[in-house]
Amino acid sequence: MYIAIYVEMKLMIITDISNKTCHSHLNKKLIMTFFIIFMNLLGCANNEEAPGDAFINDIVNAYDSAKSQVTAGNYRRAIEIFEAIQSRFPFSDLSNQIQLELIHAYYKMQSQEQTIDAADAFMRENPTHPRIDYALYIKALAYFEKEPDFLEKSFRKDMNKRPPKDTIESYSFLKQLVERYPASEYAADAEQRMIFIKNRLAAYENIVADYYLRMGAYVAAINRAKSSLEEYNGSIYNLGSLDILIQAYEKLGMTELSEDARRVRETNFSNEGMLAQQTLGNDSSLLSKPKNFLQTLFPPTDDRRVRETNSPNQETPIQNTSENDSSLLSKPKNFLKVLFPPPVAN
């Protein structure tokens, strides 16, 4: 068709070139001819499917391509493909699996908010899905307190002094996972992380309690130390909480309670244990983390073909008048005996 148009145009030019009086008429014909060619080319272009659309139309190949990008560590490109598939085929058989893949890819990209949002969306839309445990697990990891970066390590920043808002969130979701899905393949790792987080939270409570102690807010210090002992019983930082109790009770002249705390300390913590706890308290990097803390995570699939931290800026503890109210010292005097029962005589 294009050849015929071209030949017609050439003949028209040869015929009319000798007739100068038809110059304006020739221009009109040329303009009309070029317009027809342009419209034909445009129509053909619109009828042809773009390579990207054809690629996404083949959902299986697109999914495999995205998985290849994940394997290669190109998470950003993998996310682009997964999102394109999900946008075009929101109700496909692979829809739930792609949601899980996106949760994983966002996490590997260290996009905390996107990871949490994707996990929430998956759990909200699929409340009975068998992989809810995975969504809970990755959501907890997204909240898990991040490792010290280069500058923090260089300046020996004490990570325990950070307000543990995200750490508390992580602990909450790990606890949900362990309680709701005790047989989950992620439960064991979740329990190990909970131990680490419990120590971190207890350490922070002791830092705040010690601040109150040094400021002379002895009642507030006692309440913080009590809270640490009750909520994080079994933590390696229980010894520090007891020391704060002993000192605060002595400052308030509560000799009996001070002696009770001292007795519990001597009964439950040996000299070796005290040394180890003091060392751990001075160097947070020595805290034992889960052995597979740096493990590579791969999201699970329904067909089993594939198996698979950030705190806010430091805030200075504020002396709360309600915490320093002596009327709050209303808990049983023997609360230490409940937490640390005396040994049974033979």
Image: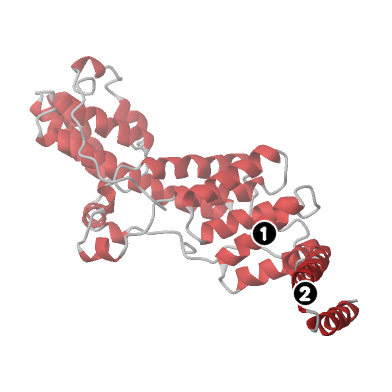
State left or right for residue 225 relative to residue 57: left
Amino acid under label 2?
Answer: Thr
Q: Nearer the viewer, mark 1 or mark 2?
A: 2
State left or right for residue 75 relative to residue 227: right
Amino acid under label 1?
Answer: Phe
The numbered dot on residue 262 is none
State left or right for residue 261 relative to residue 100: left
Q: Position of residue 329 (x, y in %)?
A: 24, 19
Q: Nearer the viewer, residue 308 or 32?
A: 32
Judging by the rendered image, the residue that carries numbered circle 1 is 82
Q: Residue at x 80, y 80 (%)?
A: 19
Q: Position of residue 179 (x, y in %)?
A: 58, 40
Q: Quadrant of the C terminus?
A: top left
Q: How many marks?
A: 2
Please determine whether, in this image, residue 176 is positioned above or below residue 36.
above
Mark 1–mark 2 CB contact (< 8 Å): no
**In which image quadrant can residue 268 be found?**
top left
Residue 305 in view in this figure: no
Q: Residue at x 24, y 56 (%)?
A: 272
Please determine whether, in this image, residue 58 is positioned above or below residue 230.
below
Task: Classify mark 1: residues with Cα within 10 Å, few (<14), some (14-19) or many (20+).
Answer: many
Judging by the rendered image, the residue that carries numbered circle 2 is 21
